[in-house]
Amino acid sequence: MKKFRLPIFLSLTILFLISSSFVSCTKKEAESGKSLMMSTTTSTDNTGLLDVLAPEFKKDTGIELKWTAVGTGKALEMGKNCDVDVLLVHAPASEKKFVDDGYGVNRTELMYNDFVIIGPKSDPAKIKGQSVSKAMQTISKKKARFASRGDNSGTHKKELTLWKDSKVAVPEKEEWYIQTGQGMLQTINIAAERDAYTMTDRGTYIKYEANHKGNPPLVIVVENDKSLFNQYSAIEVNPAKCAQAKNEFAKQFISWMASDKGQKMIGDFKLMDKPLFTPNAKK
Amino acid sequence: MEYLAQGFISAFKLLISGDEQTYSAVFTTVKASSLSICISLIIGLPLGFILGYYDFPCKKQIRAVVDTLLALPTVVVGLLVYAFVTKKGPLGDYNLLFEISGIVAGQVILILPIVVSLSATAIESLDERLKNTLITLGATGNKIILSSLFEARFAIMAAAVNAYSRAIAEVGVSMMIGGNIKWHTRTITTAIALETGKGQFAMGIALGIVLLCIGFFVNWVLIFFRKRA
């Protein structure tokens, strides 16, 4: 008897491995009739907005929206490589370059939220209520700790322009300037651990507030400045460059997002009773 | 610290309640790593046997390269495979990106060195007299390979479990190639990365515990059968 156990065991294992490889396969193939691949930024995914929009979009159009959430830099790169059909990103300058270079068409502004500068409740650099450029200058002068994404994302690019517009050199190698190279919420957490200031989009901040049940260690110190505006746009990958891109579905997605229904759903999406995004598609 | 307690509780809840998203990630993980381990064993065992059994020129150098590849960072494998499977890459037409098949390709590259290196060591450490006995008894070709592999079965099973563990626990390839797409390529590890990104640390720990359960199950099966045999 003993002799036969190992072969039996081995064949059972192999059977299990092979069957587990195929069973779920057939199920998935049945599902994926019409699908649209999108690369987007972490903020739309981490806040849960897309989890709300995708099922409704499927109900209305029959198209399954699949998305991969990466930094804006990588999202645009995937567009250049024809890996996705549509993009939903928030770095207007890079987006315009992307379109001008012929990689994308039909850039459509869909919604916005705004950036805020947050910091410890004690506000060590005393920048509360200042204008953005004043606040950035003060942080730099007082060498108050500041956490930066440092990952070439839309938020990071925005932060770099803020330093530039405030006439402060980007504090690349300063000891008080912490470049995390991580996502927004991780960066906020690092800032909280180090008593640092940081810049974030309001949507992620509200999410952070919700995670801390409304009493987070970092609070908003600078907000409502015109330069903190954060526009989200969708872009179709140029079908002339990417023959396989599902341009028809991409068009449908963008017009659905810009439709009254899509815009209303974006506006109605709330966390802790606060809206995260404001729809602003042009009619 | 409260994350840990919460994590344990929610891990339990997720598994008991049959949470659809968790099970989707579990299935994706098991499917991808099962496929990769099958392919790696089919390719790796003969290679490991050759490397462990025969003497040939440059054997030591090849061995050094294989052992070095054990340290391949998962993200580098991800980037490497991405360069091939992106639509603009040489394998772009096969649509491997954002698919489980793409993850499998990356994982095979990742774990093949483990299978080759550990099975070569297993064959090498067999008693020298076994080879002589087999030849004396008139064994040839396939017979020698199969008998040697059979004698080294436990070490080879350990190699397989080792490789499987690395496949289910890696995050670089699954993230870069799979893209963490909900219901499709979201594995347990990319889900953990996402939950951490969302600041849901307890949920991340819960999923980590789910992953450890799979690993424990695999190892337990191995121990069980080793005792029996």
Image (cartoon, coloured by chain):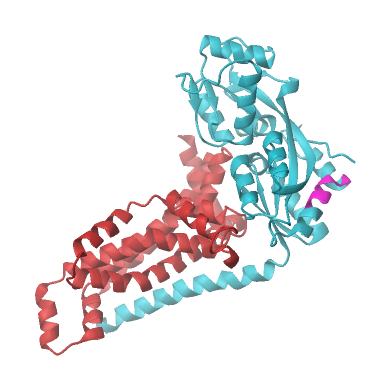
Q: With respect to residue B60, does B195 lie above or below?
A: above
Q: Is residue A71 left or right of residue B40?
A: right
Chain painted cyan:
A
Determine the image quadrant of residue A160: top right
Q: Quadrant of the C terminus of chain A?
A: top right
Residue for point 68% across, 58% down? A242
The picture places residue A124, in percent across and down from the top left corner, at 55, 11
Q: Residue furthest bottom?
A: B138
Residue for point 64% across, 25% down? A161
Q: Is residue B178 left or right of residue A162?
A: left
Q: Is residue A77 left or right of residue A102?
A: left
The picture places residue B124, in percent across and down from the top left corner, at 17, 68
Q: With respect to residue A22, does A259 lie above or below?
A: above
**Is B134 in front, or is B63?**
B63
Q: Residue furthest front?
A: A101
Residue for point 52% across, 40% down? B201
Q: Tell me if I can see residue B73 in this picture.
A: yes
The picture places residue B199, in percent across and down from the top left corner, at 56, 37
Chain painted red:
B
Q: Please identify the dominant SS of the magenta region.
A: helix
The picture places residue B4, in percent across and down from the top left corner, at 46, 40
Magenta-drawn segment: A253-260
Residue for point 87% across, 39% down? A282
**Is B175 in front, or is B4?**
B175
